[in-house]
Structure formats: structure tokens, C-alpha cells
Image (cartoon, rainbow, N blue to C red):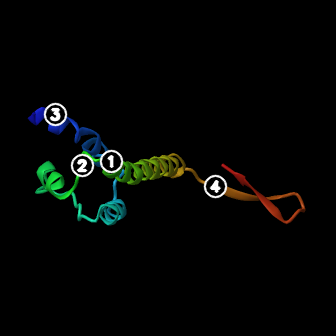
Amino acid sequence: DEMGGFAQNVPVVQALRNPGMRDRHWDDLSKELRFELRPDDKFTLRDATEGLRLHEKATLEKVQKVTDRAMKEFAIEKTLNDMVAAWDDQDFEVMPYRNTGTGVIKL
């Protein structure tokens, strides 16, 4: 059944669509799977299914390991970017704190 065959590939396809996937993750994934994976305008699901055993549990586990890491790194990256944006227009002034030789930050 054609739909059944597609359905078993859905978890891998969803994992590969992770917006946090960077070149380093595709490199790691290609190494893990021993198959060159590079998303571009020409890359299709057929390309992946012909080169990989997407329906195998071991393949799914390898894909999830890399994509989970990518997702966590993406969350950290987004948080850092949000912090930079929030603090970017702030002016800080370091004021001496008593006679301690240290300073305090004044906004």
C-alpha cells in the first residue's frame, strides 16, 4: 500500500524539517547514516528513501539524535538572540563602588 509506505517515513521527514538544522547537523547526520544528505531545492523524499532505510528504527534513532540536538541548540540560539535584542539599545555605565576598587553597573 503506497500510503502505508509513506506513513512509515513521516516521523523521519518531520525530524528532518527541523528549522534548527544547520550545516554541521547535516554533516553529522550524513556521517551517521553513511549517506550524503543535503537539503536543497532539488532534494526530494525519493532521494532520501532510495539512499536510506527511513522506515528502520535504527535510522529513525540516528535522525532523532541529531535533530534533537539541533532543536536544543536552536532554542539556545533563539534565546541568546532575544537577549541581545532586548539589551542592545541599553546604555551601561560603570560607577565606582565606594572605595572597594570595584564597580557597579548603572543603567
Mark closest to the chain's N terminus, 3 or 2: 3
Front one among 24 and 91: 24
Callout 2 secondary element? loop
Left or right of residue 15, residue 104 in this image: right
CB under 8 Å between discs 2 and 1 = yes
Mark 1 is on which residue type? Leu
Q: Distance between the residues labelled 2 and 4?
A: 53 Å
The disc at residue 22 is none
Q: Mark 3 points at which residue?
A: 4
Callout 1 secondary element? helix
Mark closest to the chain's N terminus, 2 or 1: 2
Mark closest to the chain's N terminus, 2 or 4: 2
Q: Distance between the residues labelled 1 and 4?
A: 49 Å
Q: How far apart are marks 2 and 1 (CA)?
A: 7 Å
Q: Residue at x 14, y 55 (%)?
A: 50
Q: Residue at x 29, y 63 (%)?
A: 30
Q: Mark 4 points at which residue?
A: 92
Of tags 2 and 4, the one toward the viewer is 2
Mark 4 is on which residue type? Phe
Q: Distance between the residues labelled 1 and 3?
A: 17 Å
Badge 2 local density, few (<14 within 10 Å), some, or many (20+)?
many
Callout 3 secondary element? helix
Q: Name the residue under label 2.
A: 54
Q: Distance between the residues labelled 3 and 4?
A: 60 Å
Q: Name the residue under label 1.
A: 60
